[in-house]
Amino acid sequence: STNSWVVKNIALDGEIKFRLNHSWGTNFGADSTDNPAAALEGDIKSGGNNI
């Protein structure tokens, strides 16, 4: 296991965040000071900013 998530060929009109079991209690976002994050690649962290 690489502990990696990959999103490919997605078209968004807004922001994205990863949640565990539809709960905001465990969520992952960008490890970035920009909110929302502007970079199209990089690390995520627990409770991070929207991508």
Image (tube, rainbow, N blue to C red):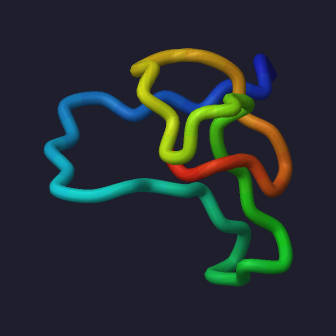
Identity of the residue drawn at 14% across and 44% down:
11
Q: Quadrant of the N terminus?
A: top right
Q: Is residue 16 above or below residue 8?
A: below
Q: Is residue 12 left or right of residue 8?
A: left
Number of marks present in the image shown:
0
Q: Is residue 22 left or right of residue 26?
A: left
Q: Is residue 40 above or below residue 51?
A: above
Of residues 35 and 11, which is closer to you in this image? 35
Identity of the residue drawn at 21% across and 40% down:
10
Identity of the residue drawn at 65% across and 66% down:
19
Of residues 37 and 22, which is closer to you in this image? 37
Of residues 6 and 51, which is closer to you in this image? 51
Q: Is residue 33 left or right of residue 50?
A: right
Coordinates of residue 12 in the picture (x, y in percent): 20, 50
Coordinates of residue 38 in the picture (x, y in percent): 42, 28
Identity of the residue drawn at 74% across and 62% down:
27
Q: To which quarter of the image does residue 9 belong?
A: top left
Coordinates of residue 2 in the picture (x, y in percent): 77, 17
Q: To which quarter of the image does residue 3 belong?
A: top right
